Amino acid sequence: MSSQRFAWQESTLPSSSSSEDASDDVFLREVARIDDVPVPREREERAGKLLADRYVLMAQLGSGGQGAVWEAEDTRTGERVAVKVLRSVSATCAARAQREIAALRLLRLPGVVRLVDEGLQGDRPFLVTECILGRPFPGVSVPCSWEALEPVLVGLLETLAWIHAAGIVHRDLKPDNVLVGPDQRPVVLDFGLSSLSVASPNPITDAGQIVGTLSYIAPEQFREQRATARTDLYAVGIMAYLALTGRVPHENRDMCAFVLARLNEPAPNLRTLVPDLPFEVALVLDQLLATDPADRPRSAAEVLERLGRPREALPLDARGEVVDPSESRGG
């Protein structure tokens, strides 16, 4: 894993790793049908630039299909912040920025990055969040032991239970979007691809468009089915699998073979790769990677209960029952 870094790491539409060649990137951009209007070079951000008469850009933290993320200084407060400037001026890009801002306003809770500010740089949206010092999930070198992974995974699932209870599906969970501090508490970042957990009358994602990061995309996303809480849980399962084994299921294949394997082949059982993993833990983590969403646990709360966590940490409804994200109407 890399050394400590700040939030935000930029989310991308289906993206290959830096070691994959340009032809793969072209393939993925075609699959994703990226709606991207280039920004003239003279309008691009640079270190030292003052944004919105307030934020001094210091160092670029990452960039991707949607825009660039900078570490910056808030000249009003002296605070270090992360500034995400959208690259595109398209209607889709603007709509996603508004969805992300709305999600972060709604999700003011521990474990979710805090929204500081938002606005326009010229005609391009930007948003500002707190700057999180941490390492990508699980916060330690991989492969790691279950003892090292358990507290971080539990913290992520607790936060995810609250996110889903609010009616939000993240849709781009991956190690770079979950930073882990020295206290082992994970913080979820980058809601740029988030969606409502119920069907929206005005969807942003067009038919034929796949959003997410390739290694963590669930089978139903390739089939253009609506993302649900179980879609996020699939990504959590991939993250846990990677943490415990050092690899991603179905890796080391060309893109078309990878997609076919993701759609049709179950991941190898974890206990075949990690024999000392507790049986019940292996069972629930394997179920997170079920090809059919109906075969996965229905919620992060269910996963936590099966891992023996107390219900007090979970969102409860007026009857004292754990909130079922499939019945959530928030967001």
Image (cartoon, rainbow, N blue to C red):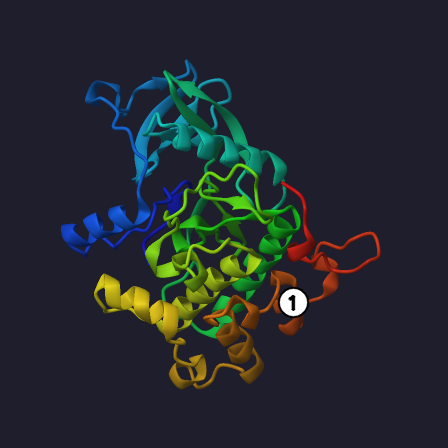
Where residue 282 sits: x, y (%)?
51, 79
Residue found at the far right of this picture:
319
Above or below 55: residue 137:
below
Residue 149 seen by the camera: yes
Above or below 331: residue 213:
below
- Which quarter of the figure has residue 10? top left
Residue found at the far top of this picture:
53
- Residue at 44% of width from left, 84% of height from top? 271
Where residue 300 sits: x, y (%)?
60, 62
Q: Quadrant of the C terminus?
A: top right
Where residue 117 sits: x, y (%)?
51, 25
Q: Quadrant of the N terminus?
A: bottom left
Q: Nearer the viewer, residue 145 or 126?
A: 126
Above or below 266: residue 205:
above
Tag 1 residue? 302
Where residue 309 sits: x, y (%)?
67, 68
Residue 143 seen by the camera: no
Q: How many marks?
A: 1
Query: In screen coordinates, is 225 left or right of 89?
Result: right
Amino acid, disc 1:
Glu
Q: Residues within 10 Å of mark 1 (few under 14, many from 20)?
A: some
Above or below 13: residue 258:
below
- Residue at 46% of width from left, 29% of height from top? 128
- Residue at 58% of width from left, 54% of height from top? 160
Kind of element beneath mark 1: helix
